[in-house]
Amino acid sequence: MSGFDDWMKTVQAASEADLSSYLPSANVVPTKLHEAMRYALLGGGKRVRPLLVYAAGALFGADSGVLSRAAAAVEMIHAYSLVHDDMPCMDDDELRRGKPTVHVAYDEATALLVGDALQSQAFLVLSEAGDAIPAARLVSMLRLLAHASGSAGMCGGQAIDLDSVGQSLTLEQLEQMHQLKTGALLRASVLLGATAGKELTEAETAALHTYSRAIGLAFQVVDDVLDATADSATLGKTAGKDAADNKPTYVSILGLEPSRALAQQLRLDAHKALEPFGEKALRLRELADLIVQRKA
Amino acid sequence: MSGFDDWMKTVQAASEADLSSYLPSANVVPTKLHEAMRYALLGGGKRVRPLLVYAAGALFGADSGVLSRAAAAVEMIHAYSLVHDDMPCMDDDELRRGKPTVHVAYDEATALLVGDALQSQAFLVLSEAGDAIPAARLVSMLRLLAHASGSAGMCGGQAIDLDSVGQSLTLEQLEQMHQLKTGALLRASVLLGATAGKELTEAETAALHTYSRAIGLAFQVVDDVLDATADSATLGKTAGKDAADNKPTYVSILGLEPSRALAQQLRLDAHKALEPFGEKALRLRELADLIVQRKA
């Protein structure tokens, strides 16, 4: 097992334990809501965002407790967005990470509240980072997370996605949609991890933006390739869904092989953006590789 | 026109203008989402929470810019909760503040995203309060807001409310539900306004908790009385809904006249809790009166 695999498994296990500790117990009233929040958040997921937080945290030696909270916060935002995205009025999906989606396992009203409460919990967990980081820097992190989550970020991307069903998007429009829908939170993960270590200079911010843009797009291109080529059992969610829903994808616009080539190019772009950070960017480089080479 | 009415109209007008300025323009992409967010938030509402923020801000001379952001943030949380609460999978309401609800005026997917994005926007607006307040105090305010919004606050109360439909609740269970569902955000409004002025002592916090508990319960008792006695046109929402939905209310448990007497008692409790603050608590006292005496 390589160093990267060990590191990844360690972060994933720590994230799982941290996420569990940052959620109310399923014995606490309202018990059904808390049980459903835990169902939505725990026991699955690749934890790509926590991995990015920790990898970026290594750039400037961030405090591990602050990273733990930042990683949990972005993962809670991600998890809430999946719960809402799966609901009948959105994508109407019944399978997620190989399990029934929240509105199927519970009911729609509970799924709605689970998402709402997970978003609040994300801000709560990050706001409780305490004295391990100067308060002004913590405010910056909370602002970053809010900006990436809202209408200028993830929610905005989902709105554009909704409006795009059945439309023929240009490559630029498709990229803009994904830069908001998934890219904003991936970028926030990188910036949160780095900011946990120090206030970033403009040059550092710009380099991390370039890196994040590349891996964000690569993530989506690979998602589209997998949706077109893998089966549901491997993905842990319904495959072939984009084509069935007549959604524009990189594969439908560029074709399969050019999409694969684009993902490889983006991987190299990501590596190049990290050059100023030297050896401390090792995990960020490896994560770019993982995002492009993943099979699910 | 009394001083209180003037003050109230001034705060309501300022809140309306501030809320508009803290939301992206309807011309900004994604335009439909931004237009729907503005539809949900602007042009209506009694602005009880902003009034509480400003009234509590007067206790310790808080900066008006910080109060403006805190008031907008709680109102955004309140507005998002109404949008989600009105959806078909929750209360399935078609009328709110005399207008079609968001999922009726737009569609369910948009209503879901409007609520999600308004919650993010609340944390964003508050996190941008800048140098007018020490960062550590701003973190405390963000934490207060997150705690009041999530599963230990408003979302938790809604979950208990959902589970209580068709059940016979005791008075204590009904009170607990409302203390979370509406009380948590009213209390947060008071504490946010006061904390914007200074770090609170334990005694100050305790007194404001007592005040908030009293007005929070009074607010709900009066809501139940109005739902049972007023018409839809006066309320700007569907009247008689609680009885039709077989929801437990103060009126159904205590009866109409005892409910009115309870509201008056809670008004006096609220006044008493404010005694230590003297004349600076004038607006908070007047708001307690307003909450009990309102007709809609």
Image: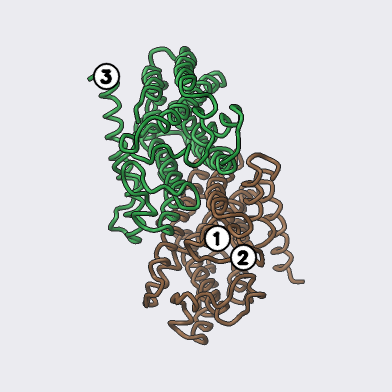
Chain colours: A green, B brown
What label sits on residue B82 in the rendered view? 1
Q: Chain of mark 3?
A: A
The residue type indicated by label 3 comes to Gly
**Residue on which the image places disc 2:** B96
Picture residue at 56% right of the left edge, 29% below the top: A175
Picture residue at 52% right of the left edge, 25% below the top: A213
User: In this view of the protein, can residue B204 be seen by the observer?
Assistant: yes
For residue B51, which quarter of the picture? bottom right
Measured Cα–Cα span from mark 3 to mark 2: 57 Å
Front position among marks 3 and 2: 2
Measured Cα–Cα span from mark 3 to mark 1: 49 Å
Q: Chain of mark 1?
A: B
Q: Are marks 3 and 1 in contact (CB under 8 Å)?
A: no
Q: Are marks 2 and 1 in contact (CB under 8 Å)?
A: yes
Q: Are marks 3 and 2 in contact (CB under 8 Å)?
A: no
User: In this view of the protein, can residue B193 be seen by the observer?
Assistant: no
**Residue on which the image places disc 3:** A3
> In this view of the protein, which residue sits in the foreground, A234 or A117?
A234
Q: Secondary structure at mark 2?
A: strand
Measured Cα–Cα span from mark 2 to mark 1: 8 Å
Where is the N terminus of chain B found, in terms of image quarters?
bottom right
Q: Mark 3 vs mark 1: same chain? A: no
Where is the C terminus of chain B found, in terms of image quarters?
bottom right
- Whole-percent x, y for residue A102 in the image: 37, 51
> In this view of the protein, which residue sits in the foreground, A187 or B59?
A187
- Whole-percent x, y for residue B114 in the image: 57, 50
